[in-house]
Image (cartoon, helix red, strand yellow):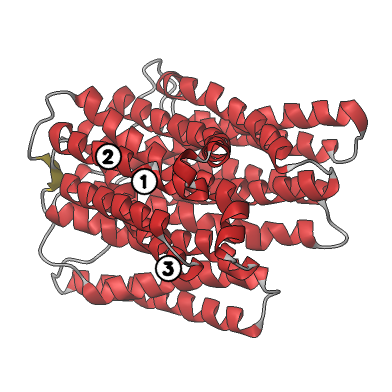
Amino acid sequence: MSRITSRSPHPTWALAVLLGSTFMVVLNFFVTTAALPSLATDLHANTAALQWISAGYGLAFAAGLITSARLGDLYGRRKVFVWGLIVFTAASAACAAAPTIGILNGTRIAQGIGAALMGPQVLAFFSAMFTGHAHRRAVAWQNTVVGAASIGGQIIGGLLITANIAGLGWRSVFVINVPLGLIAIVLALRWVPESRAANAGRGLDVAGTLMTVLGLVGVVLALVQGRETGWPLWSFVVLVAAMLALVIFVRHQRIRTKRGRTPLLDLAVFRYSGFSSGLGGIGVLYAVTGVMSVVLSLYLQQVKGLTVLEAGGMFAVLNVGFLLTSTRQAKLTTRHGVKVAVWGALILAIGYAVLAVSGTTGGTHGWLIMAAGLILAGAGQALANGALTSSVTATVEGHHAGATAGVLMTVQEAAGPVGVALLGVVYFATWGGFTAALAAMSLAALVSAVFARQHARAVNAPDAPDGSEAPGAPDAPGGSAGGRA
């Protein structure tokens, strides 16, 4: 089980600190995107260098999640979370002071490492601190915070750069993280309880860490840069080598476990009833939503001729549907069970289908149809993501909370590039375009619905009004998950 080794005098404030830190990390990604044009002019950066501002951060973030989860189990989740805040805050200050694009890219990687140290601890804290409806509500609040940061990022970034406070220009989008980070560090030390896995074992699997970092970096690098550079031979070589490294990593973890040594990732989490199907549903969900942002942005600006600000307004419509629904998701899941995730995935599929129709309709009617599709897509995403995430993290026993969070967030981060690489091809193909891409995404959302249905059956989600799932145990469908402190 997970042990809470210190008690928070104010659990609500502890939750607020965790959510506030999540908001800061997500906001940082979007305000940075808004700063790219002025940043490119000031630092004389070319397109390739600009791509690494986002890619470097994403690579470091994705590659560090599993290791970070293990560090939290070993040394305490609050301790690792606070160190993540320290690294993220210091890296933000370094980003703001960066004199060249090369140094900025290096400090962005450091920011990604800090974010990776924080990320899995938040979900692990949710599992350790809350159960039942309170757990679902915490996850729902996290989804709402992510949506709010996504909406506010472009707007806040634009306001900061336009205001040009103290002549900082684009640097202000990084400076703002420094006071926020320092406040979060103080509040985390005061209000967030310490927590760690009760049977965490000893030591860090260094070889496993190296394998997972090389594998995950290779996969994301090959998919992101391969697409950007027209799929050269090296991208396929790196992708195959990365997949091989991950296969070897899994085998290494099994051997280490058989020999009685603590693995980096306890593969027992995959034996919980519904864990793999739930993870599959989340992976497909993040793949389609990841490619959605790319396809919609390109379509609105390159085909429909909207400005960046006008295109951002259309994304706001998507996020409004997300926010309005995410505030109700926890109550719906408590009442109807995890089958709410199935409803969400189906609504998402319908939303994408409506968007596909908008691509064939011009004038005012076309924009109205697009707005309806965006609202449906945002609502479906909030329902499916919130219900699946809360159920998957509640499905496993407390002592696997760290491993669950690490695997879950790694799937989420890796799914985006995979979605762009696979489904984005439909948009970029001359015969495809927006309508065909959205139709393919609608079909993919139906696949997510199938996974969600399998997950709901596996955890035997009841139809009773209280809606509490019946988590499974390893090799024992429907067994008790118990043990969360």
- Give SS at disc 1: loop
What residue is at 78 percent from the left and 46 percent from the top? 301
Marks 3/2: CA distance?
52 Å
Tell me, yes or no, if residue 341 can be seen here.
no
Left/right placement of residue 219 relative to residue 236 reads left
- Give SS at disc 3: helix
- Residue 9 drawn above or below residue 118: above
What residue is at 51 percent from the left and 61 percent from the top? 53
What residue is at 64 percent from the left and 46 percent from the top? 293
- Give SS at disc 2: loop
Residue contact at pointers 2 and 1, CB within 8 angstroms: yes
Q: Residues within 10 Å of mark 3 (few under 14, many from 20)?
A: some
Q: Nearer the viewer, mark 1 or mark 3?
A: 3
Identity, as a three-letter code, of the amino acid under mark 3: Ile
Q: Nearer the viewer, mark 3 or mark 2?
A: 3
Marks 2/1: CA distance?
8 Å
Residue 131 place in picture, x, y as percent: 26, 29
Identity, as a three-letter code, of the amino acid under mark 1: Ser
Quadrant assignment for the C terminus:
top left
Identity, as a three-letter code, of the amino acid under mark 2: Gly
Left/right placement of residue 222 relative to residue 334 reads right
Marks 1/3: CA distance?
46 Å
| First in residue order: circle 3 vs circle 2 | 3
Tell me, yes or no, if residue 49 can be seen here.
yes
Residue 62 place in picture, x, y as percent: 42, 60
302 and 203: which is toward the camera: 302
| Residue indicated by mark 1 | 273
| First in residue order: circle 1 vs circle 3 | 3
| Residue indicated by mark 2 | 479
- Residue 113 drawn above or below residue 175: below
Q: Residue at the top extreme?
A: 465
453 and 357: which is toward the camera: 357
